[in-house]
């Protein structure tokens, strides 16, 4: 179960980083409302996407069972590397000063793509995938809400660092899976 909690924290770093940016764009009077809305969007998508990945992975697991540690390693490593790479990019290029439900939906999907890929690795862990996805969703909800508050207070300097730490964490999990197999 510790792997699921670590995975949840790592996956939530994308949403945390974006939430910081969103929090930095709003007036203090609207932060509480924005925090809840952003957390609901990101938590819901981060919780649902791994189920899609898990169900897709469950269908092909019998074909690739002997390669599963390598596949999990590769997926987690690539997701982690992408997060690290993204942490050095300039950030969200579109204007997010007008935070609409459409913008939040697009951001929620974009930040949860890696969660769908990570859902495949849930087929390798001895955990209930639905409980794991609930944990991922709740952790992402908490980090997203916190991210909006941090963004409102501290600006955007933490944004890329959170994504970098999430990427390093996923790479370390990938190496652990490979060593344990």
Image (cartoon, rainbow, N blue to C red):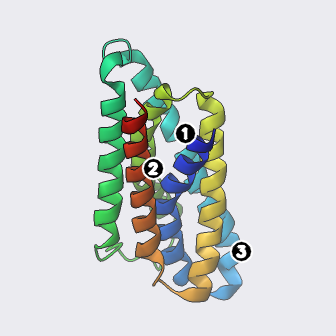
Residue 21: image tag: none
Q: Earlier in the sequence, mark 2 or mark 3?
A: 3
> Does residue 147 sit above or below 83 in this rendering?
below
Question: Which of 135 and 64 lies nearest the eye of the viewer?
Answer: 64
State the CA–CA distance, disc 2 to disc 1.
9 Å
State the CA–CA distance, disc 1 to disc 3.
24 Å
In the rendered image, which residue does mark 1 sit on? 48
Question: Which of 129 and 49 lies nearest the eye of the viewer?
Answer: 129
Q: Looking at the image, can residue 117 be seen?
A: yes
Assess whether mark 3 and mark 1 are in contact (beta carbons under 8 angstroms).
no
Badge nearest the viewer, 2 or 3:
2
Indicate the position of residue 98 as horizontal and vertical percent values: 48, 76
Q: Residues within 10 Å of mark 2 (few under 14, many from 20)?
A: many
Assess whether mark 3 and mark 2 are in contact (beta carbons under 8 angstroms).
no
User: Which of the 4 image quadrants contains residue 28?
Assistant: bottom right
Indicate the position of residue 124 as horizontal and vertical percent values: 47, 27
Q: Would residue 17 be found to the left or right of residue 38 on screen?
A: left
- For the point 70% across and 85% down, the residue is 29
In the rendered image, which residue does mark 3 sit on? 32
For mark 1, give the secondary structure: helix
Q: Quarter of the image containing the N terminus?
A: top right
Q: Earlier in the sequence, mark 2 or mark 1?
A: 1
Assess whether mark 1 and mark 2 are in contact (beta carbons under 8 angstroms).
yes
In the rendered image, which residue does mark 2 sit on? 112
């Amino acid at each position: 179960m510790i792997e699921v909690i670590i995975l949840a924290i790592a996956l939530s770093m994308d949403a945390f980083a974006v939430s910081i940016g969103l929090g930095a764009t709003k007036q203090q009077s609207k932060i509480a409302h924005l925090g809840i809305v952003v957390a609901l969007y990101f938590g819901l998508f981060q919780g649902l996407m791994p189920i899609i990945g898990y169900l897709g992975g469950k269908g092909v697991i019998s074909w690739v069972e002997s390669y599963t540690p390598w596949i999990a390693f590769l997926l987690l490593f690539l997701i982690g590397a992408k997060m690290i790479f993204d942490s050095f990019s300039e950030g969200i290029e579109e204007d997010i000063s007008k935070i609409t439900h459409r913008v939040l939906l697009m951001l929620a999907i974009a930040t949860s793509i890696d969660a769908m890929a990570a859902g495949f690795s849930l087929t390798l862990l001895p955990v209930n995938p639905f409980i794991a996805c609930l944990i991922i969703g709740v952790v992402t909800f908490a980090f997203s809400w916190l991210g909006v508050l941090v963004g409102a207070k501290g600006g955007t300097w933490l944004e890329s660092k959170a994504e970098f730490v999430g990427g390093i964490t996923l790479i370390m999990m990938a190496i652990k899976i490979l060593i344990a197999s």
